[in-house]
Image (cartoon, rainbow, N blue to C red):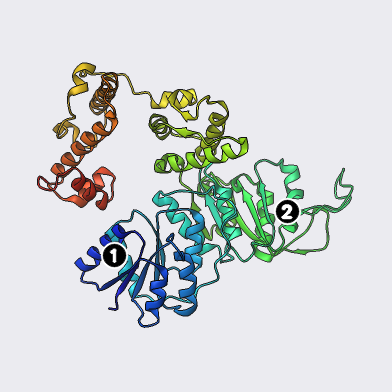
Amino acid sequence: MNEIWILDDDRSIRWVLEKALTREGLPWRSFERAQAVRDALAEATPAVLLCDVRMPGESGLELLAAIKREHPALPVIVMTAFSDLGTAVQALQGGAFEYVAKPFDIDELLALVRRAAQSVSAAAPTPNEPLSRRDLLGNAPAMQLLFRSIGRLAQTPVSVLITGETGTGKELVARALHEHSPRHAQPFIAINTAAIPKDLLESELFGHERGAFTGATTTRQGRFQQAEGGTLFLDEIGDMPPDLQVRLLRVLQDGEYFRVGGQTPLRANVRIIAATHQNLAERVRAGLFREDLLHRLDVVRLHLPPLRERREDIALLAAHFLARSARLLGSEPKELTPAALAALRAFDFPGNVRQLENLCHGISVMAPDRRIDVGDLPPEVRAAARPAPPTAPVATAATAASAPLPAALPAAHRGIGHGPAADTAGAAWTRTLIDAFDAAMRNGESAPGARLTREFEIALIRTALAHTRGRRIEASHWLGWGRNTLTRKIHEYGLDDEV
């Protein structure tokens, strides 16, 4: 195999990749600047290029574009710590073999490198302009998968069904698919089929002729005609009345439609993207949605996870919404204290990202200080962050303040507990932790959170490794961490010798 080339201005990233490739017996060569890769390509071609995005001088995406012009068969794996939709789409549409968000799992990356080395990349399409909107953000694995899917689907004409709870951002996904498609210069028309009365929806979609019904004093274009050449987004498609489902199916099958009261067929050159928060398969079984229409719409399905399933993105989204609110208000962006951020992460957000956005705008207006604390949050968020009252004896604040967390949890706590016993134990240690933190603050300790976090994570690591008999991969799964994260923390806490 030819060398694997590594391009990253971060020396620590290069070192990790070099060690991993060496361990796997793969030859490698490292570069710090894009220009050095350009110079080297004049003399040799690697099997795979691992390329960072943001570097001094020429960016990774600029280098990717040049490589795809001059070396279209070279697989390029793009790595970035800035995991937004625009970067993912630019990378994939620019011809990248794959897009990897930092921090990455080294074993998964090595498997990807081997797969890329065995592949033959096709010539790539020209990348589109960056997104005009950046609200679709996320580092969670489900969001990274979504970004990759958008990058691959945008250039195709297939119908897409977007599923997800209300407030997750389904229209943003539809807009992203449109803005990165060959139709991006044509209209994007959105209509919420659940928000328009049944008697008016047909006219809204297909238009009407003058005199078609009482009050139709002029000929009116429908949304299909307004979206001609572009994209029509049908939100909440599950609520569409049955008779209109038939008309929509005919448009999808024949590419033609009639205005209400019209006799002349009109051609429909429109890409359809539909969205719903409902389970359409269940509605089909209940006789409320046509199965043939579902098959026409559901050529490719994209699912948006609820915010409670991607809590790691709450900090990123909150900072984004607070900054945007500050721009609207003409003020300095407000910041969340660690306690306030923890409260947000504990809240389930039934309204999802839209609810978080509205919350951030509200506290930007109402919070008196630049730093937003728990007391500035809405009552329902504060209530979710408040611990349950203890149901078993707990340590007093005085003893908890000076006592470290246990080196390993008792055997009864090591499994994934359910039922009253587990609830009691959970309330007890949570209360102990809170009392320890409160007492340490009253005693003047400067940063008790750092000490308690360290002791808590050490206890978790020791317990997980004891449970798995030292098998780190299994322990990382129990902890909900990547294996690299577990290894880093073991080294950081000086636990290498004992585990």
Say which residue appears at 80% left-offset and 53% top-offset: 260
Q: Nearer the viewer, residue 498 or 347?
A: 498
Count of marks overlaid on the render: 2
* Residue 75 % position (x, y): 39, 73
Residue 229 rendering spot, x and y as whole percentages = 70, 64
Is 45 rendered above or below residue 57? Answer: below
Q: Is residue 193 above or below residue 431?
A: below
148 relative to 398, above or below? below
Q: Which residue is mark 2?
A: 223
Instruction: Check contact, mark 2 vs mark 1: CB within 8 A.
Output: no
User: Based on the displayed image, in which of its 4 quarters is residue 344 positioned?
Assistant: top left
Q: Nearer the viewer, mark 2 or mark 1?
A: 1
Residue type at numbered disc 1: Leu
Q: Is residue 94 visible?
A: yes
The residue depicted at 48 percent of the width and 39 percent of the height is 318
Q: Is residue 252 left or right of residue 443?
A: right
Q: Earlier in the sequence, mark 2 or mark 1?
A: 1
Disc 2 element: helix
Residue 393 in the figure: left or right of residue 70? left
Q: Quadrant of the N terminus?
A: bottom left
Query: In this view of the protein, which residue sits in the foreground, 144 or 69?
Result: 69
Q: Nearer the viewer, residue 26 or 304?
A: 26
Horizontal and vertical percent position of residue 287: 57, 47
Q: Position of residue 80 (x, y in %)?
A: 40, 58
The residues bearing labels 2 and 1 have C-alpha atoms spaced at a distance of 48 Å
User: Judging from the image, what secondary structure is the residue with disc 1 in?
Assistant: helix
Neighbourhood count class around disc 2 (C-alpha, 10 Å): few under 14, some 14–19, many 20 upward: many
